[in-house]
Image (spheres, rainbow, N blue to C red):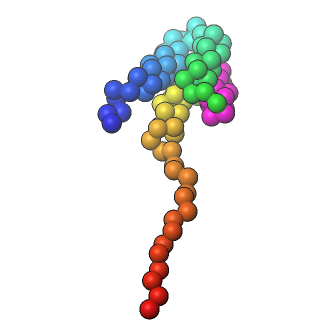
Amino acid sequence: MNIFRNKTFIKGLAYDLAGMATVAIPVIGPFLDLIWAPYAAKKMSEMYPGRKGKIASVLVFLEEILPGTDIIPTFTLMYLYTYVWKKEPLRPRVIKVESY
């Protein structure tokens, strides 16, 4: 699987870059975060449905609204958490033992 061809990854990367771009705008940037934060939270919950998506949408909202945290790539981290670092639940294994 090529990680860069996944549409979710590319979309998340674009959202992260858009969120980081507000840091580069001197006076208007913090005010743009007031508009961007709820939009990013909505997009996060749409991209990742369920409980994980709700938690991630709260985190991305806080990350975008708090000053100095715009550089955190929340969408990319959520993608990595969901598709790369996700751990399989432990399954019981049966080991056959022969007695003599």
Instruction: Estimate the x, y position of residue 97 in percent, counting from the top left.
Output: 47, 80
- Which of the 4 quarters of the picture holds residue 41? top right
* Name of the residue lying farthest toward the top: 28
Looking at the image, residue 4 lies above or below residue 34? below
Does the stretch in magenta take in 73? no
Q: Residue at x 63, y 10 (%)?
A: 35
Q: Is the magenta stretch mostly helix, strand or loop?
A: helix
Rendered view: 22 above or below 80 = above
What residue lies at 61% left-to-right and 23% top-to-bottom?
45
Which of the 4 quarters of the picture holds residue 100? bottom left
Pick the front one: 96 or 7: 96
Question: How far across and how far down the image is residue 28, in percent?
Answer: 58, 7
Coordinates of residue 36 in the picture (x, y in percent): 60, 13
Residue 5: x %, y % from top left:
33, 26
Tell me the residue at 45%/20% (across/down).
Answer: 11
Q: Is residue 84 left or right of residue 4?
A: right
Evaluate whether residue 42 shows in this view.
yes
Q: Can residue 72 be seen in this view?
A: no
Q: Residue 84, relative to residue 46: is it above or below? A: below
Using the image as rendered, state which of residue 6 and residue 58 is in the foreground.
Answer: 6
Q: Quarter holding the N terminus?
A: top left
**Magenta span of residues:** 51-65
4 left or right, relative to 81? left
Residue closest to the far bottom? 100
